[in-house]
């Protein structure tokens, strides 16, 4: 919970130095959220992705776990993001090395920082849904369709 506060300087640096674009950041967020299944993060980051120029078809694919049509220069990082989420933030050492080789030390640190941020959001959102489900005897906190944001 203190992670964003402790890393506020790094987070600010990622944005101000444009280490990764906003569209790239949102693709990473959506890839992790697709694995973790947080409906709040899916909705929020789908909206942010639309604002940053990512098309609705691509958003739907990313939320479905399909990454093949992602931009070529971002594909390795998006696949890494999925792997990172699937392994509970413990990726294979080889994957970490490949990420750093492709994006450099600063770029891979920025990517991992974004992944940690969205994981924290996913955990909080899913915990909130669990709480709602428990206190309402299953009436609230139910997962919605991942692409329901597109229908509103």
Image (tube, rainbow, N blue to C red):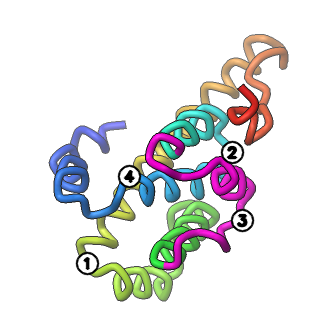
Count residues near mark 2 (Cα–Cα under 10 Å), then give few for <14, some for 14-19, many for 20+: many
Q: Earlier in the sequence, mark 3 or mark 2?
A: 2
Point out the frontmost of discs 4 and 2: 4
Q: Quadrant of residue 130?
A: top right
Quadrant assignment for the N terminus: top left
Per the model, the C-alpha gap separating discs 3 and 2 is 14 Å
| Local SS, label 1 | helix
The CA distance from mark 4 to mark 2 is 21 Å
In this rendering, position of residue 111 left or right of residue 38? left
First in residue order: circle 3 vs circle 1: 3
Q: Nearer the viewer, residue 5 or 81?
A: 81
Residue carrying label 4: 22
Q: Are marks 1 and 4 in contact (CB under 8 Å)?
A: no
Local packing at callout 1 (Cα closer than 10 Å; few below 14, some 14-19, many 20+) is few
Q: Which residues are magenta?
A: 50-72
Q: Earlier in the sequence, mark 4 or mark 3?
A: 4
- Residue at disc 4, secondary structure: helix
Query: Is label 2 in a helix, a strand or a loop?
Result: loop
Q: Secondary structure at mark 3?
A: loop
Residue 71 in picture, x, y percent from top left: 53, 71
Residue farthest along the top direction in this orientation: 136
In primary-sequence order, the first of circles 1 and 4 is 4
Q: Which residue lies under the disc numbered 1?
A: 105
Residue drawn 68% across and 45% down?
Answer: 37
Across and down, in percent, residue 108 comes to 34, 72
Instruction: Tell me how far mark 4 sits from mark 3, CA to CA.
Output: 20 Å
Task: Tell me, yes or no, whether the two marked residues, 4 and 2, touch with CB atoms within 8 Å.
Answer: no
């Amino acid at each position: 919970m203190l992670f964003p506060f402790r890393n506020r300087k790094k987070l600010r640096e990622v944005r101000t130095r444009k280490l990764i674009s906003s569209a790239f950041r949102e693709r990473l967020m959506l890839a992790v959220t697709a694995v973790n299944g947080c409906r709040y993060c899916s909705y929020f980051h789908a909206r942010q992705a639309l604002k940053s120029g990512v098309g609705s078809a691509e958003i739907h694919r990313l939320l479905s776990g399909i990454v093949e049509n992602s931009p070529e220069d971002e594909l390795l990082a998006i696949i890494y993001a999925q792997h990172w989420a699937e392994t509970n933030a413990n990726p294979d050492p080889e994957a970490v090395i490949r990420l750093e080789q492709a994006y450099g030390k600063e770029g891979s640190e920025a990517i991992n920082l974004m992944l940690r941020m969205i994981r924290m959001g996913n955990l909080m959102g899913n915990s909130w849904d669990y709480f709602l489900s428990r206190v309402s005897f299953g009436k609230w906190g139910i997962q919605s369709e991942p692409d329901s944001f597109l229908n509103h």
